[in-house]
Image: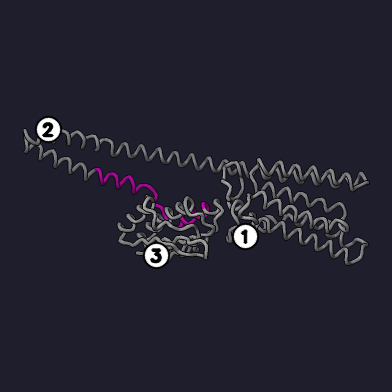
Amino acid sequence: MSEAKTPEAGVAEYRLADRCPREDLVSTLVMAGVWLGFLAFPFSRILTDPAPWSLRALGIAGLLGFCCVYLYAYVRPRLLPARPLWVSTSVYTAGMAACAALAAPTGGPGVLIASTYVCALWLFTHPWRRGLPVAAAVLLATVALTVLVTQDPAERFWIIVPLSLSALTIALVRYAVGRDERTRTLREELTLARQREAFAREVHDVLGHSLTVISMKTQLAARLVRSDPDRAQEELAAILALTRESIEESRSVVSRTAPLTLDEQLAAAARALRAAGITADLPPASATDALSARADALFAACLREATTNVLRHSGARTVRVCVEPDRLRVVDDGVGGAAGDPRGHGLAGMRARAQAASATLTVCDDRADALRPGTRVEVRL
C-alpha cells in the first residue's frame, strides 16, 4: 500500500502516508494555501461579471471548492489507502478540474491559472519521475485549451506566459527541494559510515590485543595443566585478570557512544511509520520527562524493536504508543499472533532486556475491531 521513500523522491515523508501528521498540519496548510492568493484575479472577475447572481454564486462556489479540494489533498494525500498514491492524486485532480469548470463561465479564461495548482500537487506529492511528466502534460493541455477559448492575442499572451512561468517556478522549487533532500540523506549516510569506522577502529585497538593475549595464554595453560600445574594456575589467574580488564575496556568503549533515548526513538518511529503509510498515535514530548534513566533506555530499546516488528510483520494501519513513568505500551491493529510466534529474535531480545532491568514484558493479541486482532506489547518496571 505504501510507496518506499527514496532519496530522489525529495518529498516530505508524510506525503506517502495516509494523512498529514497533526503537528505539521498548520505549517502544511500555510505553505500550500499562501499561493491561493493568486486566485483573487478570477475571483474579482466573477464579482464584476454582468451575469446573473445565481451564475456568479456558482462561480464563487467553484473557486471555494477548488481551494478546499486543493488544501485537503495536502492534508490527506492518500485518499484511497488501498490504492497507489497516484490514484488518489488523480481523484483530487478531477475534483479540482470540476470546481474550476464551475467558475469558468463567469471567471473567464483566467480560471485556467488554476492548472498550476494541479502541477504543484503532482510535483510535491510524488517522486520526480512521476510528477514531472504529469505536470508537463497538464501544462500543455492548459496551453492548448487557452488557444482554443481565447481569440484576443493579448489576452492569450497574458494567460500563457504567467501560466508557463508559474509552472517553471514550481518545477525549479521542486528540483531544489529534491536536491536538498538528496544532499541531506547522503550527508547523514556519510556521517553514519564515519561513526561506524571510528567505532570499529576503537574496538579493534582496545580489544584486539587483549583477546590475542588471552588466546595465547589459554593455549599455554592447557599445555601446562599436567606438566606444571603451578605454572598453569598462574596463567589461568592472568587470563582471569585480562578478561576482567577487557570487560572494563569494552564498557569504556560503549560508554563513549551516545545512548539511545526515548525522545529520539519516538521521532524515529514516527518517521518510519509515516513512510510505511501507518498512522501513529504517539505521546507528547513531555511524556518522557518523568522517566528515570533506566526506564528511558529500556523503553527506547523496546520501542525500536516493537516498531521494527510492526513494520515487518503486522500489516497494521494504526499504532498507538503510551508512555508512563513505569510502563511502555505499543498497540497496533494488525494481524496479531506475535505472542505465539517462537521464531522472533526481537521478542527474545526484548525479554532479555526486560529481565536485565527487572521489568516484565507482555506480548498478547489486543483486538482493535471485529476482524483484526492486533498486538499489544507492554513493558512494565
> Which residue ends up furthest to the front in the rendered image?
371
**Disc 1 element:** helix
- Are there few (<14), some (14-19), or many (20+) residues within 10 Å of tag 1? few
Q: Between disc 1 and disc 3, whose residue precedes?
A: 1
Task: Verify whether residue 370 appears in magenta.
Answer: no
Mark 2–mark 3 Cα distance, whole angstroms, equals 53 Å
Q: Amino acid at mark 1?
A: Leu
Q: Between disc 2 and disc 3, whose residue precedes?
A: 2
Task: Verify whether residue 269 appears in magenta.
Answer: yes
- Left or right: where 349 falls relative to 65: left
- Left or right: where 112 falls relative to 128: right
Q: Name the spot of residue 197 as percent of width and height, x first.
A: 40, 37
**Disc 2 element:** helix
Which label sits in the foreground, 1 or 3?
3
Q: Amino acid at mark 3?
A: Arg
Residue 233, quarter of picture = top left
Q: Name the spot of residue 223 as percent of width and height, x first.
A: 12, 32
Mark 1–mark 3 Cα distance, whole angstroms, equals 30 Å
Q: Name the spot of residue 82 as percent of width and height, x first.
A: 61, 54
Q: What residue does disc 1 label? A: 25
Which label sits in the foreground, 1 or 2?
2
